[in-house]
Image (spheres, coloured by chain):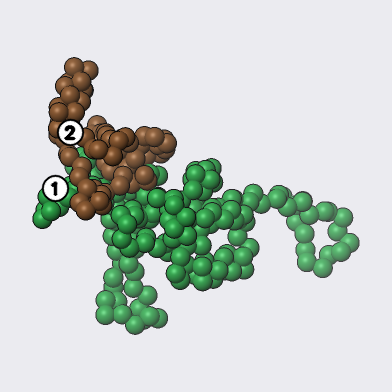
Amino acid sequence: MITNRGVKVYPDGMPETFCTDHWRCRFVAVEETGVTFDQVLALLHALHNAHVAVIKTEHLYTFDGRCGYSLGQGE
Amino acid sequence: MNTFQMGDLSNEQVLPALSPVAVTPVAVAYGDGIGPEIMDAVLRVLDAANAPLRYDVVEMGETLYRQGYKSGITPEAWTTIRRNQILLKAPITTPQGGGYKSLNVTLRKVLNLYANVRPAKSYAPFVASRHPKMNLVIVRENEEDLYAGIEHQQTPEVVQVLKLVSCWKQQRQLPGCSK
């Protein structure tokens, strides 16, 4: 999922949604084993090599099996 | 211009045929809680006023959340709203717990409805008021800041909430104001 100012713009975004130059890309593990920090570093490395300007990262956790992060608006 | 006097049945002039009034299609969402009752009343008023409207009812809100639509609205409803460009909605419930996002916020953020315009005018002396001369408009920006709704629990004890404020959006909020 990609959001802009917290609104989901991919997949199934709307052309009416106002977008700024600030994007959030959320990566979620397909497997239930989760994501390792090595995988996070590999992803950042790949983005860097693709000339994507990464300004910050957020790690998404579950707590007692429940999501510890909010959905994107419209997700 | 043709003239016609009331009761002048001998006048051979014929009134021009009235042009048919264009009917405006409006998406209508009955909402939750007191919403259906309110909407029924509003539509009765509009019908009594012979407003040239066609109501396209769309489903959204608590029932859709419970059916598994995480955003509380169906793709079909989005299509109707975007086609008609007008939505008349009643209050909508966001279920508590489960991380549901407010559909009210989703609608205005997705559709770029950034200005919440609230006139506040006194109708004194016809309506008693402590502020008989009040006549102002409050415009609230209702897409950014904490409406971004970006929250992360980072440890068992700490949650982070992000406020996003864009320079462009804030400048658009009040077009009559200087920078």
Residue occupying image coordinates x 57% and y 56% = B57
Whether residue B85 is visible here, answered yes or no, is no
Which one is in front, B15 or B102? B102
> Mark 2 belongs to which amino acid?
Thr
The colour assigned to chain B within the rendered structure: green
SS for callout 1: loop
* Residue B75 image point, x, y percent: 49, 44
Quadrant of residue B104 within the rendered picture: bottom left
Q: How many marks?
A: 2
Mark in the foreground, 2 or 1: 2
> Mark 1 belongs to which amino acid?
Gln
Whether residue B25 is visible here, answered yes or no, is yes
Side (left or right) of B16 relative to B61: right
Residue occupying image coordinates x 28% and y 43% = A6
According to the picture, the residue beneath numbered tag 1 turns out to be: B154
Quadrant of residue A43 within the rendered picture: top left
Numbered mark located on residue A36 in the image? 2
Side (left or right) of A45 relative to B77: left
